[in-house]
């Protein structure tokens, strides 16, 4: 989303679904995973909208949709690419929107080579580095270079090297027949979706696209979302009521934990974490964020960065020391969670904090997680109950197999009971970027404490310990602003004081900032997360606003506070035509009011409110003043929606169908089987199933996909321990089609064992027509559905963990694992127990000829002729 | 007063139980066509009413692991998987029906009529409620219910209400405070609607019409008819298939339907005996 | 209690004297039934909150009596949820008041076979010791080219998507000041 539009967040809000004329839910099981949000889908349906669910499984979402369209797990890019082709092949794009609001007219340099020309690779691939050099992907620069550094364009969109034509050629082979071949989706059903989507994407009608982790959990997850973004841009649905892309997130504040990141590669507000060799000095850092001549608000990254450094290091951050930029540690390469786990196994990490997360069950490749934790010196677990990640040393599956012995595990484990949401105050940021304050109802019991309490007091103790230190490495900690007021019997720090710091303040007057536009580069302002500035405007906790919904407009701007600037629909400038008039009366949202000389409407306009639609920047104009009056994507360097991403992505400027890293099928589109740039982690603990053209892929002939159920929450820490939820879904099960049950002799209600190169797990069998058997490349495809909520450890209901089956292959852009499509075998009966389980898995490995090299080729080697 | 329809046939429930000026009768309209099977109703009911967990067992009955209504399950979501050809092109099509079942709060409630202790009573809202402090656990009500709703709570002796007859109270305590029952409050898609029965009947008829106009000829109402075997129920449903498919009796009849007639016959017979005796006595006079 | 009141509390009397000859309505109510009210009516306060499960962000009303949570319901004022909750949200009271929640710090010593109790303050000090030790042992001043790293790889952290923004902010701020870069959460998963 960030690459295509400029911001990494859902572009609209749940209530706005009611305005949609068509809702396509793909890669999301919304009714099951976001039931209360689904009321807005039902509202839209009641108003006459068409609801389509594209998913490998027929779920509770499908049951309520007008149409369920099955496809093979891992084939969504082919499906969506088919719709792109349907749009472009039939001239169904929203022409004026595409011409004016996207980069369709940009000319790409003559050296660019597409996957269609290079059999599945883009130009610039380096097999040794397993990555791309994006030089040839760049736009053709104006010669001689003119002031605004914009690329050569062809407004008629006919030049063979313009983005529009490249896109057209790129997807030309994604025909309905090819979609059926790749996805197994019957052609008529595919065309039904294509028709509904395009017929409901006009001046007068909009289609909303809803996705979730069914898209992100792939080795090409970012490209899945890019394909959706390309479609919504082509069809002119972005920034408009009932349109947009609604990313549904699965934790109370997962959006917030990206905005104010507990992530290694980001600082608050999507400022990058400094990288050694790239961002060594502050000037390098700022120069890399916004290039010269860049439009929009990123050119002010200097003010955001200085304000952040001033918020953290106060008086110690001065103009002379580059605002203490040197206090920031530097990253180098991948330090993400899966790399960390490997580093634990290799003894490089000594101590580990787990804060409301249960990786022994919830992360891919559970065994790797547990082996990593068993090799730590110490582990701190902060949770409600004794989750599997706290007790792996006594009841993990590796204890049963004899791979680990309790007495051999040297990990010291500290379990700290956590306070619940009712026992602390603070904010969650929901799926629509809405920040909502929750008040404290009661005190926690016993040793239960908030994480705010834990980290504040840990920091306090550490600072006391080092008070007398003269070691320069301790200066950042000692100079840190860490003086939040505390209150009550437990000395709970004030969450509101922290929120005020996040918001930012004018250090001269002490006045809370009301907008990030007030941030300064001279150190006179401080603010911990620039995109959240305004949340404490006027000294009022705006996130705690609770004006009842029924007393305000349908946009409900006075309920909580949404970043950025309390804007509820992003890119809403595009809800008006280039001249600032609504595309239609029915879809009016924000528009230019010539009399008042400003943008107005139902929401905070997503543009400079006083910039008229006809504004054209002078060559000297900078930053937001460099945006033309018809540039709706104000966080993009060029103000346009990106159909083609010349930069920002490691695995290609356009989405392309690749097979999942583990697939029983050959890629019918290219010789290249899987994404050449996928991140692999080849080692003995992380073996892969073979995929064609490698031999023995038939040992794992089925595709499995993992998912959540309504009745449980993620790895179960907040549901398996509750009688009322445990009784509703009491046991691990697998879902299979009657055809697969016949093929493998599986009995409904009986047991099955599911095996991969990693391990084998057991599950009760549900035989159901809801798991359709599809025909892919002339073969029957059977898919196995596996919910992932159970683990061998605590809770009122336990069971094998689906995530134990998964290997680690990651999306190179975001280091997210492929967990929604892998290959497996399934057999009737329970799995072996004890050491016999290891022998059982070893037998699979040997039959499939698995070594550490299996599945690791970047470029697919040429197929050997059959012997 | 005791009228012809006191035990069978159309009647207004609360006045029939002696309420002089009761508030409007309330109930549920459960529109199964918008049910997403989330089971929020089951949980909200349990949280409000303090009902114990009812067995942690996989039933293999689609996504239903609750099984049936009972003493510790006052809302039960049924899941029905169907595969049938599409009417237009004959393609096999999967349907997944979900429906939240509940006590019907019958106009003529046999459970109440047979209760010897007065533990079951008709509230001023026209609903049927067990009074835990009166029930002696005799169990007469259990076979009397034509829907199999009410049951005796099992569990270790001494646990809350073990041995007593238990079922949905339509959140009688909440109604006293003008609040909506817990299940209907939680329901994410308004599949469970609470309100005055007359108003719900109108809503149900309108919804049925809308669905049928949209070609959903299989849609039908259940429990809305005051002329049915229980005098119309306080919980009506919009179903998308035969009631049996959902585990509902197609033609429920209050098990005490004939009590009045039996009494009348008994009274007649008794009267005849008395009359005979009188005649004999009188006739015996010389 | 006067005779009349006493008599009035006798159901049969009420059955014969009221309009409820079959004894199925008001005549049958017990004193407890007559005194019934919803437990929320007796709440000391209603606290506005947000559901802690998925990211829809449903509004919750938390009813508190005698400093205990007695009920959690959807907040009808929320324009997003309009008072509704899913089964998990509806089970929030069981989540926060249930017996599965631990109340004490627990400690498993190296190679230990069971949990031991530990005082919270002691545990905090022990963790502080270990953080400083791991930080020191994993410290890297510069990379192979002599470029400043000023970081430690000795410790790591996972989790944040279930926490408050303010909590994530303190984690990021503290870890960064310590030079600890390996911070991750569920957004990566």
Image: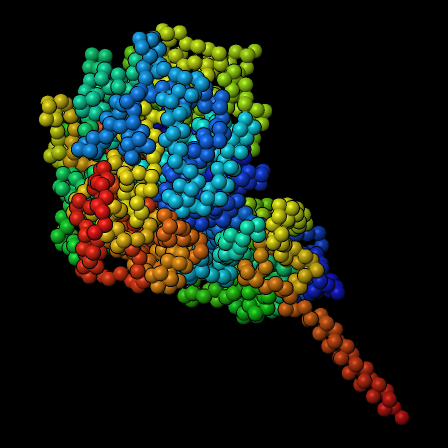
Residue A806 in view here: yes
Residue C118 in view here: no
Name the foreground residue: A236 vs A726. Answer: A236
Is residue A634 left or right of B125 when viewed as pictured? left
Is residue A395 left or right of A243 when viewed as pictured? left
Numbered label tally: 0
Where residue A555 sits: x, y (%)?
A: 52, 29
Q: Which corner quadrant holds the N terminus of chain A?
A: top left
Tell me which corner region of the image, top left, top right, bottom left or bottom right, holds residue A528.
top left
Of all residues, the one furthest to the bottom in this rendering is: B286
Tell me which corner region of the image, top left, top right, bottom left or bottom right, holds residue A814.
top left
Name the foreground residue: C77 vs B87. Answer: B87
Of all residues, the one furthest to the right in this rendering is: B286
Q: Is residue A450 above or below residue C144?
A: below
Q: Is residue B152 above or below residue A775?
A: below
Where residue C52 sits: x, y (%)?
A: 39, 41
Q: How is the image coloured?
A: rainbow
Where residue A401 sits: x, y (%)?
A: 19, 58
What residue is at 44 percent from the left and 40 percent from the top?
A: A176
Q: Is residue A462 above or below residue C9?
A: above
Name the foreground residue: B65 vs A29. Answer: A29
What residue is at 22 percent from the left and 47 percent from the top?
A: A865
What residue is at 30 percent from the left and 45 percent from the top?
A: A666
Name the foreground residue: B270 vs A828. Answer: A828
Is residue B236 left or right of A270 when viewed as pictured? right
What residue is at 45 percent from the left and 28 percent from the top?
A: A234
Where residue A17 sits: x, y (%)?
A: 50, 35
């Amino acid at each position: 989303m960030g690459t295509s539009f400029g911001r990494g967040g859902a572009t609209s809000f749940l209530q706005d679904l009611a305005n949609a004329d068509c809702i396509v839910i793909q890669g999301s099981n919304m009714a099951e995973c976001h039931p209360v949000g689904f009321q807005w889908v039902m509202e839209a349906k009641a108003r006459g909208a068409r609801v389509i669910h594209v998913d490998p499984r027929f779920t509770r979402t499908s049951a309520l949709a007008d149409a369920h369209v099955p496809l093979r797990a891992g084939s969504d890019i082919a499906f969506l690419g088919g719709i792109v082709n349907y749009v472009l092949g039939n001239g169904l794009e929203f022409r004026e929107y595409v011409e004016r609001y996207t980069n369709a007219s940009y000319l790409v340099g003559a050296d660019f080579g597409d996957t269609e020309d290079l059999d599945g690779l883009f130009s610039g691939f380096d097999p040794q580095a397993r990555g791309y050099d994006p030089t040839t992907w760049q736009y053709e620069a104006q010669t001689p270079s003119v002031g605004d550094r914009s690329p050569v364009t062809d407004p008629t969109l006919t030049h063979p090297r313009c983005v529009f034509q490249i896109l057209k050629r790129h997807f030309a082979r994604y025909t309905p027949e090819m979609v059926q071949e790749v996805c197994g989706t019957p052609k008529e059903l595919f065309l039904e979706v294509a028709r509904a989507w395009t017929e409901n994407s006009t001046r007068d009608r909009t289609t909303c696209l809803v996705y979730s982790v069914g898209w992100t959990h792939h080795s090409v997850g970012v490209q899945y979302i890019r394909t959706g973004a390309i479609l919504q841009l082509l069809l002119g649905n972005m920034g408009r009521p009932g349109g947009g892309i609604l990313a549904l997130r699965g934790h109370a504040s997962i959006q917030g934990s990206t905005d104010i990141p507990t992530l290694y590669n980001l600082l608050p507000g999507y400022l990058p974490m400094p990288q050694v060799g790239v961002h060594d000095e502050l000037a390098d850092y700022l120069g890399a964020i916004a290039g010269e001549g860049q439009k929009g608000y990123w050119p002010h990254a200097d003010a955001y960065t200085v304000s952040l450094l001033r918020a953290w290091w106060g008086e110690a951050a001065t103009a002379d020391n580059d605002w203490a930029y040197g206090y920031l540690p530097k990253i180098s390469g991948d330090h993400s969670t899966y790399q960390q786990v490997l580093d634990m196994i290799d003894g490089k990490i000594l101590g580990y904090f787990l804060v409301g997360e249960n990786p022994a069950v919830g992360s891919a490749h559970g065994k790797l997680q547990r082996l990593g934790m068993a090799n730590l010196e110490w582990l701190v677990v902060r949770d409600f109950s004794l989750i599997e990640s706290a007790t792996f040393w006594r009841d993990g599956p590796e204890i049963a197999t004899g791979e680990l012995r309790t007495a051999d595990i040297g990990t010291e484990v500290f379990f700290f009971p956590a306070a619940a949401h009712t026992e602390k105050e603070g904010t969650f940021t929901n799926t629509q970027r809405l920040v909502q304050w929750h008040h404290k109802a009661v005190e926690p019991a016993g040793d239960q404490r908030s994480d705010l309490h834990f980290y504040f007091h840990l920091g306090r103790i550490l600072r006391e310990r080092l008070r007398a230190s003269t070691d320069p490495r301790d200066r950042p900690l000692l100079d840190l602003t860490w003086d939040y007021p505390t209150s009550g019997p437990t000395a709970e720090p004030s969450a509101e004081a922290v929120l005020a710091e996040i918001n930012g303040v004018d250090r001269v007057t002490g006045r809370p900032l009301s907008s990030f536009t007030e941030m300064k580069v001279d150190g006179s302002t401080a603010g911990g997360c620039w995109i959240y500035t305004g949340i404490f405007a006027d000294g009022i906790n705006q996130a705690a606003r609770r004006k009842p919904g029924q007393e305000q407009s349908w946009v409900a701007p006075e309920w909580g506070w949404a970043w950025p600037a309390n804007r509820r629909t992003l890119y809403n400038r595009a809800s008006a035509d280039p001249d600032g008039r609504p595309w239609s009366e029915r879809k009016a949202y924000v528009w230019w009011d010539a009399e008042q000389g400003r943008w107005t409407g139902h929401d905070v306009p997503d543009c400079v409110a006083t910039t008229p639609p006809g504004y054209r920047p002078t060559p000297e104009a900078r930053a937001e003043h460099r945006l033309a009056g018809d540039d709706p994507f104000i966080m993009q360097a060029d103000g346009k929606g990106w159909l083609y991403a010349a930069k920002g992505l490691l695995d290609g400027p356009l989405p392309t169908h690749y097979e999942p890293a583990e697939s029983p099928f050959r890629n019918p589109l290219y010789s290249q089987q899987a994404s050449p740039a996928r991140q692999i982690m080849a080692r003995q603990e992380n073996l892969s199933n073979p995929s064609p053209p490698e031999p023995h892929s038939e040992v794992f002939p089925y595709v499995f996909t993992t998912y959540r159920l309504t009745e449980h929450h993620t790895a179960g820490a907040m549901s398996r321990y509750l009688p009322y939820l445990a009784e509703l879904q009491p046991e691990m099960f697998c879902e299979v089609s009657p055809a697969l049950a016949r093929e493998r002799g599986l009995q409904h209600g009986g047991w099955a064992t599911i095996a991969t190169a990693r391990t084998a797990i057991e599950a009760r069998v549900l035989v159901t027509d809801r798991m359709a058997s599809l025909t892919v490349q002339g073969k029957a495809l059977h898919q196995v559905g596996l919910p992932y909520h159970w683990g061998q450890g605590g809770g009122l209901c336990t069971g094998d963990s689906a995530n134990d089956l998964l290997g680690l292959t990651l999306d190179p852009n975001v280091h997210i694992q492929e967990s929604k499509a892998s290959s497996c075998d399934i057999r009737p009966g329970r799995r072996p127990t004890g050491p016999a389980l290891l022998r059982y898995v070893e037998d699979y490995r040997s039959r499939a000829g698995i070594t550490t090299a299996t599945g690791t080729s970047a470029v697919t080697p040429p197929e050997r002729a059959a012997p | 007063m005791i009228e012809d329809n006191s035990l069978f046939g159309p009647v207004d429930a609360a006045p029939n139980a002696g309420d002089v000026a009761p508030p409007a009768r309330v109930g549920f309209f459960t529109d199964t066509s918008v049910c997403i099977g989330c089971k929020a109703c089951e949980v909200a009911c349990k949280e409000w009413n303090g009902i114990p967990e009812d067995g942690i067992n996989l039933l293999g009955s689609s996504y239903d692991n609750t099984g049936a209504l009972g003493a510790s399950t006052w809302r039960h979501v049924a899941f029905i998987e169907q595969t049938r050809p599409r009417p237009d092109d004959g393609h096999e099509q999967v349907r997944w029906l979900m429906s939240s079942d509940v006590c019907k709060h019958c106009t003529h409630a046999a459970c109440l009529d047979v209760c010897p202790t007065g533990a079951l009573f008709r509230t001023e809202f026209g609903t049927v409620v067990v009074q835990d402090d009166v029930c002696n656990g005799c169990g007469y009500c259990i076979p009397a219910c034509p829907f199999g709703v009410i049951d005796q709570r099992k569990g270790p002796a001494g646990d809350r209400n073990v041995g007593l007859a238990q079922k949905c109270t339509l959140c009688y305590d909440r109604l006293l405070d003008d609040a909506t029952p817990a299940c209907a409050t939680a329901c994410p898609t308004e599949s469970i609607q609470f309100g005055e029965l007359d108003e719900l009947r109108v809503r149900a008829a309108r919804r049925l019409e809308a669905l049928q106009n949209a070609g959903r000829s299989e849609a039908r109402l259940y429990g809305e008819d005051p002329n049915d075997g229980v005098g119309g129920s306080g919980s009506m449903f919009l179903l998308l298939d035969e009631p049996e498919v959902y585990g509902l009796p197609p033609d429920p009849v209050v098990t005490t339907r004939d009590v009045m007639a039996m009494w009348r016959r008994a009274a007649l017979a008794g009267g005849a005996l008395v009359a005979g005796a009188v005649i004999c006595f009188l006739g015996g006079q010389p | 209690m006067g005779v009349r009141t006493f008599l009035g509390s006798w159901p049969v009397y009420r059955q014969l004297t009221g309009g409820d000859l079959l004894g199925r309505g008001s005549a049958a109510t017990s004193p407890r039934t007559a005194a019934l009210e919803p437990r929320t009516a007796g709440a000391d306060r209603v606290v506005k909150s947000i559901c802690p499960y998925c990211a829809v962000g449903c509004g919750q009303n938390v009813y508190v009596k005698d400093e205990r949570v007695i009920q959690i319901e959807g907040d009808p004022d929320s324009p997003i949820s309009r008072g509704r909750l899913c089964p998990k949200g509806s089970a929030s009271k069981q989540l926060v008041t249930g017996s599965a929640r631990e109340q004490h710090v627990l400690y498993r010593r190296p190679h230990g076979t069971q949990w031991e109790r530990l005082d919270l303050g002691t545990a905090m000090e022990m963790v502080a010791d270990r953080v400083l030790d791991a930080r020191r042992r994993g410290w890297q001043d510069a990379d192979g080219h002599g470029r400043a790293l000023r970081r430690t790889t000795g410790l790591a952290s996972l989790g944040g998507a279930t926490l408050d923004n303010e909590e994530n902010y303190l984690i990021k701020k503290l870890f960064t000041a310590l030079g600890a870069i390996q911070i991750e959460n569920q957004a990566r998963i």
